[in-house]
Amino acid sequence: EPETLFNPSTFPISSHEQYIFYEFEIPQTLVGRLIGRKGAFVNKIKATTDATVIVHPHRNRRFKLCSVEGTKRQVKAALGMIREYFPLNRYPDITLEQVLTQQPVPTQLQPTLNTQTLQIELTAGVVVEVRVSAVVSAGELWVQQPLHPSYSALHRLQSCMNLNYGDGSSTPSLPIPVQDGTVCVAQIKGQWMRCQVLNTVDNVSLVVLLDVGGTTSVLTSSLRQVRYDYMTLPFQATQCFLHGIEPVIDDTSVAVMEELVSDTILFANVVSYTEDGVPLVNLYRRDSDQYVHLNEKLVLLGHAQWMSQEPSG
């Protein structure tokens, strides 16, 4: 299996700013007061300290997990505002004590996660703006949707995973034997990414990268269990095939495809689906005042040919 990770430098990762993520528990009954009417208090914290306050689900339904994010100085200032707003003598249940949330998804759940239910779909019947994150061949690729409401959270997720997993020494590895289909995290080119195990042979696992697409091989022992709260963001990469064409296997077709789709917003229109439910798309690139049909362009360049029969829907 060839590695298909494409242009990883464009994956939205954090800079080297020293952000911290301070998390504490808050009773469910006080979450509304913390947030404020229409987000008034958390917005005030943001405006005053530049720290971000986000409330996450907690395994105990009586509580929520509050995450304060920013530089050390920003977080300290935000916690000061929260303490002033919730005096300890009146709100003894809000201790602001930092909690460690390195909680992996329970082992028994990991092999049974259905990635399709967490996957962003390409909507049929409309033209969708996409960026290509992985190229498998001249006819198969993975795309992200920059205009999807969840896309902006990918940057934050990447920052959180890099900080919390670190060198991987303090997080649980996967139970052996690793089952095919297990969703976990892997460190790829220095970045922790969500992935799914396709198969494992002799301590080498072939994984698909769920937020950028493509496959790569990693040491099974380097895989780590995924934190529960890292499963709330939908997987950002969607696999698709170019409709009506069959790629010509040669030494340059993938490189040509990458050149056609890299560093630009494209437009995808779902025409049909494979039997496995993978979308078949027409892909367009805007050049000046015209749209170039990339399916046709690949055929004209000799890197693909039209299929004799239309694919079944």
Image: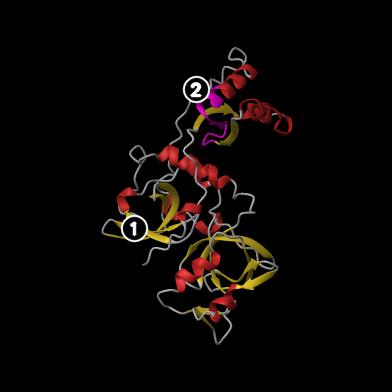
Q: Quadrant of the C terminus?
A: bottom right
* Kind of element beneath mark 1: strand
* Residue pictured at 71% horizontal, 29% vertical: 40
Within the image, what quadrant is residue 283 found in?
bottom right
* Kind of element beneath mark 2: loop
Q: Name the residue under label 1.
A: 205
Residue 272 seen anywhere in this rendered image of the structure: no
**Crowdedness near tag 1: few (<14), some (14–19) or many (≥20) residues, C-alpha within 10 Å:** many
Pick the front one: 177 or 204: 204
**Crowdedness near tag 2: few (<14), some (14–19) or many (≥20) residues, C-alpha within 10 Å:** few
The residue type indicated by label 2 comes to Glu
Instruction: Name the residue at the bottom extreme.
Output: 308
Within the image, what quadrant is residue 30 found in?
top right
* Residue pictured at 59% horizontal, 34% vertical: 55
Q: Which of marks 2 and 1 is nearer the N terminus?
A: 2
State whether residue 106 is above or below residue 80: below
Q: Give the range drawn in magenta.
A: 58-76
Instruction: Name the residue at the left extreme.
Output: 202
Q: Name the residue under label 2.
A: 97
